[in-house]
Every structure is written in C-alpha cells, then in structure tokens.
Amino acid sequence: MGNREALLIGAKACLREKGYDRTAVRDIATAAGVSTAAIGYHYGSREALLNQALFEILDEWGDAMGRALVPDADGSSRAHFERIWESLIEQFGAHPDLWLATVELFMQAQRQPELRAALAGGTAQGRRGMAAILDGVSEDEVPETSVRTLGTVQLALVSGVMFQCLSDPSSAPTAAEVLEGVRALAEIAR
C-alpha cells in the first residue's frame, strides 16, 4: 500500500474517531504512518483528503446497507421498511462523529463550489440508493421517477431523523415512531 492509500485509510479512521473538525493533519499522518507533508503532496489539503474519505465512507455504508436490507422472501415491505429504520437509527447512535462529519461537510460545501458539486452528486446517488433499497432492485434498475419521489422523500426523512438523533440522543425517535409518522403523513396526503 502506498502513502496515498494509507492516508485515505488513516483519514477514514480519524473521521470515525474524531469527526471532521477535530481531525488535524497530524492525526491523519500518524494514523497513516506517513509525514504530514504527504497530505499536501497527494491530496492538496486536509479538507480535500477528509472530503474524499467521507464520501468513500458514506458510499461503503450505503453499499453495505443495500446488501444487508434485502426484502423478505414473503414480500413484506412493512417488515423491510422497519428493518431499514432500525438499522439507520442504530447507525446514528453507534457512530455520531461520522454523521456529524456529514453535517460539517454540508456546511463546508456552502463555501466551496467544487465540494458543493461533489456533494450534489453524492446526494443524487443517495436518492437513487434509497429508492433501490426500498424498491428491492439494483440501482441501475430504479426508474427515474422513483429516484425523484421515493428516494427524495426517504433521504429527507433520513436526514431529519439523523439530526434529531444527533441533537438529543436520549429522546431520539424509534423505528416504530418513524413508521407511525409515515403512516400518518400518508393518511394526510390522501
């Protein structure tokens, strides 16, 4: 493994342990076993390295979630949806620094046009991934209308619940409460 790959692995470890803002150049270099100068040489800046590491972590998480949350053989979409929410809420509680890092990334993107473009691409991929998981199909099989509707709403719900879990873990919503809220919204929308 070269320094570039070691830095990416080290940055991922630091994001999980410390979050975005608390990770220093020295932390990444130490975790990677390289000099601090290697960050500038390979990535240009701490931020560029952390951004790439965070995008990769989120992509890996989305892939793992998609593999783990396949619909039941009996086709019970309700049980599938409940498992998705149980898994999401568990992840928010288990790795709060990682999810706080995603919030920090959104804030950074407001001042960095190139990061904003990358984040827009990641958001589009997130909508597609959410729709694929809920529809029980691969991402390349998801109709664009499902991406723009089902994927968009699920991603909005995920983001909102994530903020609630991070801001007040002791009264974070449960999967059952989220499902009941979705049912109530569906009833209103009728």
Image (tube, rainbow, N blue to C red):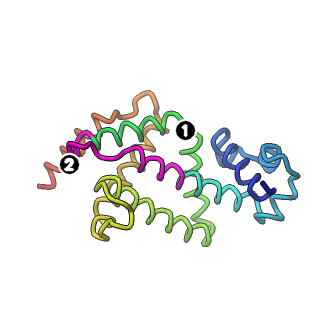
Position of residue 5 measured from the top left corner of the image (x, y, whole percent): 74, 56
**For this view, does 42 lie left or right of residue 18?**
right
The local secondary structure at tag 2 comes to helix
Q: In terms of depth relative to the viewer, which is nearer, 127 or 168?
A: 127
Q: Residue at x 41, y 37 (%)?
A: 89
Secondary structure mostly seen in the magenta stretch: helix
Extent of the magenta region: 59-79
| 140 part of magenta stretch | no
Q: Position of residue 90 (x, y in %)?
A: 44, 35
Q: Quadrant of residue 30?
A: top right
Q: Give the x, y percent position of residue 169.
A: 46, 31
Q: Which image quadrant: the N terminus?
A: bottom right
Q: Which label was assigned to residue 96? A: 1
Q: Please name which of the two marks, 2 or 1, marks the residue nearer to the observer.
A: 1
Give the mark nearest the N terminus, 2 or 1.
Answer: 1
Amino acid type of the residue that numbered disc 1 sits on in the rendered structure? Pro
Amino acid type assigned to the residue bearing label 2 in the image: Leu
Q: Circle 1: is it few (<14), some (14-19), or many (20+) Cα within 10 Å?
A: many
In the rendered image of this protein, does residue 18 appear above or below residue 185? above
Residue depicted at x 62% and y 72% = 114
Residue indicated by mark 2: 185
- Find residue 130 and report its horizontal and vertical position in percent: 37, 55
Residue at image position (30%, 54%) is: 136
- 163 is higher (above) or lower (below) than 133: above
Q: Is residue 84 left or right of residue 74?
A: right
Q: CA distance from mark 2 to mark 1?
A: 28 Å
